Image (cartoon, rainbow, N blue to C red):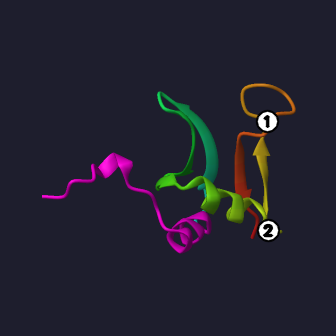
């Protein structure tokens, strides 16, 4: 039995990037009980430094403004 709970595990960078190639998949910043975290939806949690690497890609663009106008909350990979 693993000591790391499944919900505490994060996707590796390459796995997150591969998931982003699927239509309808987004990188999203969500607020959790422990604070803001990054997720590939659908997919799983992503470490914040890996999310930053994904956001630096030229083929990743904002998807919508999120909760407040002008504040980006989700991004998608353009094909």
Q: Residues within 10 Å of mark 2 (few under 14, many from 20)?
A: few
Question: What segment carries the magenta color?
Answer: 1-21
Q: Earlier in the sequence, mark 2 or mark 1?
A: 2
Instruction: Indicate the quadrant where residue 25 lies.
Output: bottom right
Residue drawn at 60 percent across, 69 percent down: 17
Residue 71 against residue 6 in the figure, above or below: above
Residue drawn at 27 percent across, 53 percent down: 4
Q: Is residue 75 left or right of residue 35?
A: right
| Image location of residue 64, percent across then percent down | 77, 40
Residue drawn at 81 percent across, 34 percent down: 71
The question of residue 8 being in magenta is answered with yes
Instruction: Give the SS element for disc 1.
Output: loop
User: In the rendered image, which residue does mark 1 sit on?
Assistant: 65
Instruction: Indicate the quadrant where residue 79 lies.
Output: bottom right
Q: Residues within 10 Å of mark 1 (few under 14, many from 20)?
A: few
Residue 62 against residue 79 in the figure, above or below: above
User: In the rendered image, which residue does mark 2 sit on?
Assistant: 59
Residue ranking furthest to the front: 3
């Amino acid at each position: 039995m693993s000591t790391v709970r499944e919900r505490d595990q994060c996707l590796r960078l390459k796995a997150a990037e591969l998931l982003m190639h699927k239509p309808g998949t987004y990188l999203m910043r969500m607020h959790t009980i422990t604070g803001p975290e990054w997720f590939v939806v659908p997919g799983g949690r992503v470490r914040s430094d890996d999310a930053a690497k994904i956001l630096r890609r030229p083929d990743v663009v904002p998807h919508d403004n999120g909760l407040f106008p002008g504040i980006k909350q989700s991004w998608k990979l353009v094909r």
